[in-house]
Amino acid sequence: MTDVTDVTAQPPSDAPSHLRGAVDLSSLGTPASAGRTAPGADAGAGGGSWVIADADQGLLQQLVQLSAQVPVLLHLHVPGDAASEALYRQFADAVDAQAGRLVLARLDVAKEPAVLQALGLGAGPAVMAVVAGQPVPLVNQEVPEETLRQLMGEILEVARQNGVAGTVPAVAPARQDAGAAAAEAPPVPPLHRAAHEALAADDLPGAVSAWEAALAESPADAVAQQGLSAARLMLRTRDADAAAVRAAAADGPDDVAAQLAVADLDVLGGHVEDAFDRLVRFIALHPGDDRETARAHLVDLYTVVGTDDPRVQASRRRLAAALF
């Protein structure tokens, strides 16, 4: 799993496990600085960027309001820090590649320490996402390109689930360093790229098909396996009525389908350990075909979360005890 910042707060109910730990930005709401270009304003017909390199606290309330139209990413920048500069370049390229479906704003935490305090962070650098006014931590260091693409797809999917699926015109002139990080990155396999493009376009069946094709071409492709499991999870839960799913699970503790459905919602919402514990308990109490169905589903959820995640490793030990 992506390394997330340490924020102690309640997770959003419908966010993937990457996206958890909502905090309150209301204390930072101040009028935008006079003369500043408001987010969403066109930067000109000659090309532009969706990256605001010099945002400040005065602009933050407008950014929070803009998050009702598109996801807004906040880069909490530490000047002179090489890791912070690399993180900025990576996310700036990824945001501009979406051409208006997201906006990135860089804030200098040395000049704006109140931002860190409001977000419950001890220090930068970090990147936060804000969707419909709800900010959540993403990462505090560079991630592999495949992980970044999956993360961007998850952000857009969470935004769509919350009614945030618009686009905005460029908010700044074109960046002179655009594409520098992309030029250094290894080439992305064509089927991986197709899957990420389908996910970004809200085409979950297309993403599933592309990942399936990638696995057919290379069965040992761990990135494709994780992408396929994640895309299938999002597709399974896309039209789910969370209240109805949870009520069915409460009413049917022996109904394997009902238990799998609520475990899916828990993983998608970031309640990973709750999902794992639910299915391990079910497996311990239900021998036979239902046990194998639940076991196979749990292993697939391990793939979604990431096999190196300590929560997966702990759950595997509990699963072994339940089976043997």
Image (cartoon, rainbow, N blue to C red):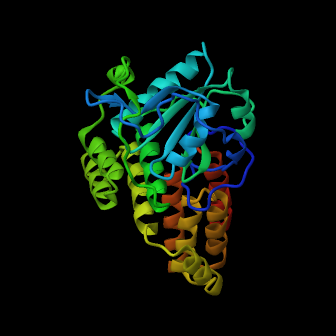
Query: Residue 271's spot in the image, x, y percent?
Result: 64, 59
Question: Which residue is nearer to you in this view: 24 or 282?
Answer: 24
Question: Which residue is nearer to you in this view: 81 or 134?
Answer: 134
Q: Is residue 3 visible?
A: no
Q: Residue placed farthest to the bottom in the image? A: 251
Question: Which residue is nearer to you in this view: 120 or 114?
Answer: 114
Q: Looking at the image, which residue is at 60% across and 80% down?
A: 249
Query: Residue 18's spot in the image, x, y percent?
Result: 56, 47
Q: Looking at the image, which residue is at 52% across and 32% down?
A: 105
- Quarter of the image with the N terminus is top right
Query: Residue 57's spot in the image, x, y percent?
Result: 64, 32
Q: Is residue 254 visible?
A: yes
Question: Which residue is nearer to you in this view: 183 or 312?
Answer: 183
**Vertical relation: 295 (above or below) 148:** below
Query: Residue 198's spot in the image, x, y percent?
Result: 30, 51
Q: Looking at the image, which residue is at 62% across and 39% down?
A: 4
In this picture, residue 32 sits left or right of residue 220: right
**Number of dots carrying numbers:** 0
Q: Residue placed farthest to the top in the image? A: 80
Q: Looking at the image, which residue is at 37% across and 22% down?
A: 175
Q: Residue placed farthest to the front in the image? A: 34
- Quarter of the image with the C terminus is bottom right
